[in-house]
Amino acid sequence: NKLHILLALAVLICLSFSCKNEKNGNLAAVVSKIEKPNIVVIYLDDLGYGDLSSYGATELSTPNIDALANGGIKFTNGYATSATCTPSRYALLTGMYPWKNKNARILPGDAPLLIDTKQQTLPKLLSKAGYETAIIGKWHLGLGSGFVNWNETISPGPNEVGFDDAYILAATQDRVPTVYIENGKVVNLDKKDPIQVNYKKNFEGEPTAKSNPEMLSMKWHHGHNNSIVNGIPRIGYMQGGDAAKWSDIDMADHFLTKAQNYVKSHKNNPFFLYYAMQQPHVPRTPHPRFVGKSGMGPRGDVILEADWCIGEFIKTLKEENMLENTLIVFSSDNGPVLNDGYFDDAVEKLGDHDPKGGLRGGKYSLFEAGTRVPFITYWKGHIKPSISNAIVCQMDLLASLGDLVGETETTTDSQNILKTFLGETEKGRDHLILEANSKTALRSGNWVLIPPYDGWPLNKKVNIETGISKAYKLFNVVEDKGQKNNLAETNPEKLKQMIAIYESEKFK
Ligand code: NG6
Ligand code: CA
């Protein structure tokens, strides 16, 4: 009898192995459901290290994200690769250091696709393991391969780099075209009112923030003075596409509903969902339900709105009995900025809130607040709640999640630190190159090295220290979180060591 059972088991195991890669095979579905959790990456835009109550904020309360932080691993040394959006997203999806690709910088809304369609990507790797993959939210990695005709199918894009489904905004909320794109097609496009986009010159007769300031409901501070959509002046010129234009105040709800529907309709096969939320990037347009709720103006209000959305999303996972079968990764693409080009009271109403959470710098900066961000992994029943001081980077998700689903990946810069992400070890990366506006720095152990660069020490428009100076800077960021004491001169030995690591990483 025992032998029979053993035989039956052996047959089952063989069968399950042979079916593993068959996406729609019934047995494969059952087996992979047990073995492979759904994976959701919730990615915010410009959320700072100190913007969550679980990361020390006292003036804002973010209970839903806190529930993930307190019920999972809260990383205190979690990094985006970069201090701006496009390069960080590039690294997240490709596992490659963005400074190795000279085009990986903030892209205009009509830029060509930055990721080579032959490149390895996180969704491709997970697809190989039988996952269905989707992006819902902000893309900002370029579309097409030259001039984009927004009225035809737009390709290549997310679908060509590994996403089975894509419901995106092309670039940023402040850039045209201000429309949603679903699997290469502009949503609600009226062919009789075709969309045209130009980042260099306006279309004749189209109002701009400069020609028609009376049309504005939000004022621009720097940049953001081209086409006007919903009273908000944007970057870039756009003509046509009226029926397709999004409603800014409904954007958060819109993406949330899409994300909830995706979950509900993908119960039979493991899925990877990249839920790329637009908050708290400018223009900050909270739904009226959230206006005034933070007392901090729109920036605080949209953080509360994002937190609410995440709470609703988790509720859906719970209702669908999927929470224990879903690994959630939460992070942000770069550090915080207050005035990023609009007058929206972010500076005036900040009060005692510190979006940087005690770090120095902010978005666009080589100092820590540029790249060190909230970073959480949560998997109910599988990850034990803890706080981890390990150095981890979003770029490592590719190799690590690959390992989780049985796919080995060693050709990229992504390191397999799955055990760190699951809380099985406190050890993360030894070191990491950080990037801001194509300039780089090094985090290694407790230390940060910023090499000398030419340029301004202060980005005056956004009032953020860039980290740029003509001398080496060396900080012990464990003892000196705010990077106040430059030890380059007093610790020449450490400086030498750090320069050696930096150069071997950058020029290998
Ligand atoms: C800058 C924009 C800023 C923001 C940023 C991209 C101006 C003056 N500033 O060029 O408002 O859109 O690009 O942010 O235009 S990111 O988070 O997507 O990198
Ligand atoms: Ca960003």
Image (cartoon, helix red, strand yellow):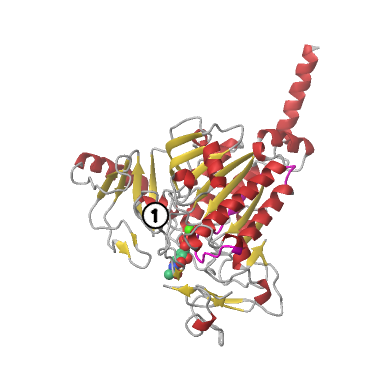
Q: Quadrant of residue 30?
A: top right
Residue at the (62%, 73%) spot, across then down: 149
Residue at the (66%, 45%) spot, across then down: 315
**Residue 447 position (above or below residue 14):** below
Q: Main secondary structure of the magenta part?
A: loop
Q: Quadrant of residue 244?
A: bottom right
Task: Please state the horizontal and vertical placement of residue 267, each as a whole percent of the image.
Answer: 73, 43
The span shown in magenta is: 266-288
**Residue 8 position (above or below residue 395):** above
Q: Residue furthest bottom?
A: 205
| Nearer to me, 367 or 36 | 367
> Considering the image in quadrants, where does the N terminus appear?
top right
| Nearer to me, 229 or 148 | 229
Task: Please state the horizontal and vertical placement of residue 79, each as a whole percent of the image.
Answer: 44, 47
Residue 322 falls inside the magenta stretch: no
**Residue 117 position (above or below residue 414):** below
Q: Using the rendered image of the protein, determine whether residue 413 is visible from the camera's viewpoint.
A: no
Residue at the (71%, 75%) spot, across then down: 190
Residue type at numbered disc 1: Asp
Residue 283 falls inside the magenta stretch: yes
Q: Name the residue tied to disc 1.
A: 352
Residue at the (46%, 67%) spot, across then down: 344
Q: Judge from the rendering whether residue 226 lies leftward or rightward of residue 34; answer left or right.
A: left
Badge count: 1
Q: Using the rendered image of the protein, determine whether residue 333 is visible from the camera's viewpoint.
A: yes
Task: Please state the horizontal and vertical placement of residue 111, each as a whole percent of the image.
Answer: 52, 67
* Number of other residues with Cα within 10 Å of mark 1, as a class: few under 14, some 14 to 19, many 20 or more: few
Task: Please state the horizontal and vertical placement of residue 8, each as a whole percent of the image.
Answer: 78, 21
| Nearer to me, 363 or 344 | 344
